[in-house]
Amino acid sequence: MSFLLHFSNYLIGGNVPIDDGVDKLNRKYTILILICLSLPLVTKQFAGDPIECFTPTYFTEPQARYVNSYCWTASTYYIIPVDVEDREQVTRVHSVTFDEEGGSTSIRGERIKVNYYQWAPIILLVEAGLFYIPFAIWNSTAKNSGIKVGRLLKKVSVISQYTPGHPDRDALIAEFLDQFNTLMGVSKCCPGTVCKFDCGLACGGNPSSSLFILYMIVKIMYVFNILMQYFLLTVFLGKGYLFHGVEVVEKLINKKEWWTSPRFPLQTLCQVLAAQQGSLRTYTCQCVLPINLFNEKIFSFIWFFFALLLPVTIYSALIWVWRTFTCSRIAFVHYYLWRTRRVGKEDLYNNARKMAIQYLGWDGCLVLRLIEMNHGGTILTILTERLWEFYEGLERAQQDGGDPEAFLSQRPPIFACGPFPTQGPPTVTPTPTGAYGFYGKHYLPGTPGAYPGYMWNHQDMATPGYSGYPRIRGKISSAARGPPSASCYTWRLTVADASLTRSPPLPKLQHR
């Protein structure tokens, strides 16, 4: 079981934090269940005797083995009893009636062909593969699209492993904020009257909604997949399978015992054409299918499992539809802004409303909700606080005429990622830094021990949503090396007396 868990984590992205619990139930645990259910069938087929046929006494042992192999490969059939009461038990079993196929027989009654048992393990594995398809689409988009949502959410997993105050944690939070703001772009709200009502659907455009729309398509695919699974099993086992679970429950209530469905017969017949005394003769052999003991229980369990999984998946999709409504997004942001204690009660709702509509939009709220579901509310509260600082600073910059220098006046210390060379001027590519998402390359003259007092040039710094690249020059007032991370050392730098060479101004926020 431990091997299967590790295998599932490797193959189907077991712990990838890019979806909710119901998605994981579909794409991880359901796949694992179907694979486990296929194992006894595979074992019985290749390591046991899936079929045993009773042959005439004058058949040699090779002839008996041939009959077993032929009947397993060519399928068998059983006869519906003539008794009316017995016939009622199989009225819903899909029958293939044939009169002459396979030769004549002295047995009376309707013949029902049983031709599924050879393919049962393959059918289960195909079902498992179908459950993986929606996740594969979503995971591929999250990993390979320009927004790199998968990398963004995995970064939160790393952040949650560090204790508060750890310099690596602060650097990773700053990097997360930069990538998140790149995902959001410049905040705008839709024009016109489409967004006039708080509980109306949010508009498209900026903030982006394409990521959320794709996620909803994946949700619908999960629902459609379960419905299609019922259809495939009905084709595979017969049209009566759609009511198989109802029949089982009905028999358990009425007869107080497990009902052996004629859909999974233990005794069947097989007709074999064999040479005897220079001529071909048709032999009707009685066969027992012990593998159907497994098939009956397995496909009964699948019926009930899918019957529970379908409404849960539909409910999850409907909940996400509700989360598209503006009032739901405002309530979500309102709660976490309240937890930060950074906004007064009198301004809390208005600020939550502006942040949810103008800044986060559908995609931003989707990312934050996935963080909440996979990592909890504590880390999301910390990230919401930093996102609010950025949004508040962006609004302040607009009020000051769109000057990026407004960001610098309250910019926190910079976290640069080494290692630094021991000789010569070190060039460091830092993690994206600051609450406002600045990033780029630092040029720090001198040796690591001589950082304080030297000048700092930042020529590649960019602001998310800003078309120009400002050039900043400042004096380093302090530098302290933190503990090493997995790939580099983290340095905390405080820049004083910063100045900025003007570039094109920040675009205006669109206020409602």
Image (cartoon, rainbow, N blue to C red):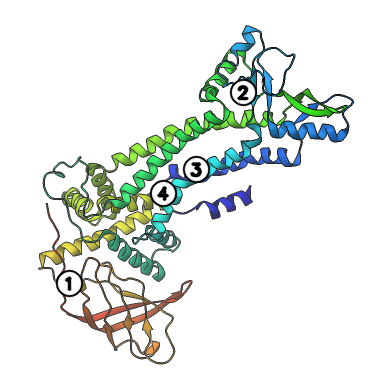
**Residue 173 located left or right of residue 65:** left
- Discs 3/4, front: 3
Q: Which residue is mark 4?
A: 19
- Furthest-top residue in this view: 84
Where is residue 104 shown, x and y percent of the image? 72, 18
- Discs 1/2, front: 2
- Discs 3/1, front: 3
Q: Which mark is residue 263?
A: 2
Counting residues from the start of the chain, the first of labels 3 and 4 encountered is 4
Look at label 2 and name its amino acid. Arg
Q: Which residue is mark 3?
A: 130
Look at label 4 and name its amino acid. Asp
Q: Are marks 1 and 4 in contact (CB under 8 Å)?
A: no
Residue 102, quarter of picture: top right
Look at label 1 and name its amino acid. Pro
Q: Quick one: SS at disc 4?
A: loop
Q: Nearer the viewer, residue 277 or 475?
A: 277
Counting residues from the start of the chain, the first of labels 1 and 4 encountered is 4
Where is residue 236 shown, x and y percent of the image? 56, 31
